[in-house]
Amino acid sequence: MLAGLTLPTSVFAQSAQDEAGKQPNIVIIVADDLGYGDLSCYGAVSIRTPGMDRIANEGLRFTQGYCTAATSTPSRYSLLTGLYPWTNRDAKILPGNAALIIRTDQVTLPKVMKQAGYATGSVGKWHLGLGDGAVDWNETICPGAKEVGYDYSFIQAATNDRVPCIFIENEKGVGLNPNDPLYVSYKHNFPGEPTGKDNPELLRMHPSVGHAGSIVNGVPRIGFQKGGKAAQWRDEDMAELFLEKAKGFVKDNKDKPFFLYYGLHQPHVPRVPNERFAGKSGMGPRGDVILEADWCVEEFLKELDRLGLTENTLVILTSDNGPVLDDGYQDQAEELIGSHQMAGPLRGGKTSLYNGGTCVPFLLRWPAVVRPGVQEALVCQLDLLASLAALTNQSYPDRTDSQNTLAVFLGKQGEGRRELVIEGMNNYAFIQDDWVMIPPYPSRGHSAESEDFAGLGLCYQLYNFREDIGQQHNLAEKESKRLRQMMAAFEKLKRITGKQTDY
């Protein structure tokens, strides 16, 4: 792994602290499947996102902000642990009853923040596993967010389309009735329970692929659950509930430094906006839930204003991976997209090795220190651990892949990452400076790049994304020397990290 053992406070970090006058509050807002082109500050014209745009207008908009993986669980794992997802074989898209994939003894971002004296909270999407793989959802659910480093948590176990469809607050299922216990399975249905496959007459939203399991709120899900009826969520209320919990955590901790991880569940499927947003975008449910997510961000920022916390709160908004249209439900996302380019000028989307899969919205605001502008350096969510540790003058014993790029995150002079490995669906690409190399992989079925890869055969791809942001011109033959150099650098990195990839 690549980072050093300790992160001493740099001259710049001390300067930032001095400028702010005290440690900043830190909020990381992570949207789910939100694309580079889904925000008006990144060029969207068919939809307006004034809440998210406010962060860009009052802070920094990164043009080369990356996550490590084009799917949710591995991306979120990297953000919280500072490790590439391949270092953990379980860091793949998880079922809702998966065990916690973060070791309870390993360094995490919230643990570093607690070490710095911060109150820590997690609200919204989790999807990193809970318990030991044999959870009794009716009892205390651990290990979980608490063992990862959070003082407070109000989360959903996985995704909107996976059971269990309940909320979990401080390791306890919310609203469960002992007389109607909840049972969850990803292997078989429970006798007498209706499913999307067998009971389509009960559905108000129909699947396009998969999602044939238990029906909750008229929507078929992945997996099966029985009981817990009083605790089941209503999709339309989820956004505002998460917002209120996030605001409540801030209010409760306004007199001391706090760290909040706020996981928006939009625009992941099933896309079921609150009634006041339904039909407002003209782009169908996907557009509507983006408007809803934007409203949540806007209201959250207003709460910081109301509490007098805006000036010294560092807010980061990003996405766990790139966008997708049809992700398993018939919600007219493809039919109603119109001229909207959800990945903007980028190629590909969710699951893709092209930059639309991992180059995501990345905005940062800290009015006390950061001047508004545009930052073009390459940055990655992977590096938030080392960078925020440096900002708060913390060290940690574990080696990680996280690099201290704090100066770049705050818009000062400095270089971003020079090298980065990105993950699609069990395949990898390598970024070095302005170049990205994609090794040859066979098409792996349902993914954003399958159609693009189909005509390429098993050949290397090499793109200069500064000159060719849409990755339309494969320069592997023309730049054969550079390709060989990048192949060698990639192999060296794999040896350093112990990663073995087949291609």
Image: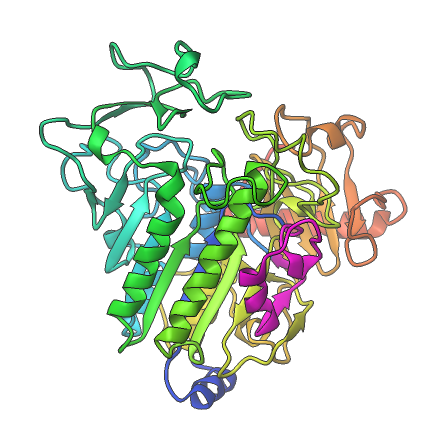
The outermost residue toward the right is 478
Q: Residue at position x 34%, y 53% from top?
A: 123
* Residue 174 locus on image (x, y percent): 21, 42
Q: Considering depth in this image, is 486 or 82 the residue closer to the camera?
A: 82
Identify the image quadrant of residue 234. Answer: top left
- Left or right: residue 106 versus residue 178 is right
Q: Considering depth in this image, is 228 or 487 the residue closer to the camera?
A: 228
* Residue 280 locus on image (x, y percent): 57, 45
**Tell me, what colour scheme is on the image?**
rainbow
- Whether residue 37 appears in magenta in the rendering, the answer is yes
Q: Considering depth in this image, is 487 or 95 the residue closer to the camera?
A: 95
User: Is residue 405 positioned above or below 17 on the image?
Assistant: above
User: Is residue 74 positioned above or below 360 on the image?
Assistant: above
Q: Range of the magenta residues?
A: 36-65
- Left or right: residue 360 versus residue 273 is right
Q: Residue at position x 42%, y 79% from top?
A: 312
- Whether residue 74 appears in magenta in the rendering, the answer is no
